[in-house]
Amino acid sequence: MQYPPPGFKPMERSVRLGSGDERWETSKAALMSWGVQRGAGLKVTHVDLGTGEQYAGIRYSEDGTPVGMREAGGAEAVYNDEGEPLISNGMSAVLKTKVGPITVDAPVRVVYVIDDPKRVGFAYGTLQGHPQSGEEAFILEHRDDDSVWLTVRSFSRASSFGWRLLTPVASSVRKDITAKYLRALHPINAA
């Protein structure tokens, strides 16, 4: 991300997960059911399906005058083979992680979903009570050379004065969790 909002720190990391249709399908199924977060050791709790809608933008007239909101399309919930809902627009959850003896709650809401033939993923924004303020995206690509890549992209800053005091600790935890995200879908970690 070249131009994060002022005061926010950008981050982008990618990893090759392997190649082939089987790696693509396996990674896609895991990614869209919170597999990256669970594989990184986070607990995913309080999942709410939300609206299934995403922001569609503003409609403009020929002269550029705003004339109203575009219609946002909703979607039915889709479930995996285990009966868990797949990630969808508007879905919210609380991600829980341990930092030493303390459990930290990190509420998030999905702000968009990508579902293209060779690219899938989602991004969530932080909600009130999250230690960070920002967004994080998880994008899986099946490239032309048949390789499968996961990219984690984010921008964030401490959400409150109290969390700003812990910036060095938060930065270390963030780097650690991002490294775990990148390993979560790797076949060497599959059990």
Image (tube, helix red, strand yellow):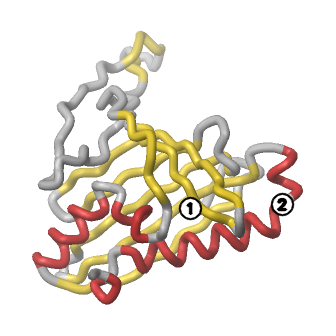
Q: Which mark is residue 166?
A: 2
Front-most of 119 and 31? 31
| Pointers 2 and 1 in contact (C-beta within 8 Å) | no
Which is nearer the N-term, disc 2 or disc 1? 1
Amino acid type, label 1: Met
User: Residue drawn at (50%, 75%), measured in percent from left and top?
Assistant: 180
- In this view, 129 is above or below 26: above
Where is residue 93? Give x, y as percent: 45, 42
**Which residue occupies the extreme bottom position in the image?**
188
**Residue 28: quadrant of the picture:** bottom left
Q: Which mark is residue 57?
A: none
Where is residue 102? Give x, y as percent: 70, 59
Q: Which mark is residue 1?
A: 1
Residue 48 vs residue 52: left or right? right
Cα gap from disc 2 to disc 1, whole angstroms: 24 Å
Residue 83 vs residue 90: left or right? left
Figure quadrant of the C terminus: bottom left
Total residue callouts:
2
Residue 102 vs residue 14: left or right? right
Where is residue 19? Give x, y as percent: 20, 84
- In this view, 179 is above or below 32: below
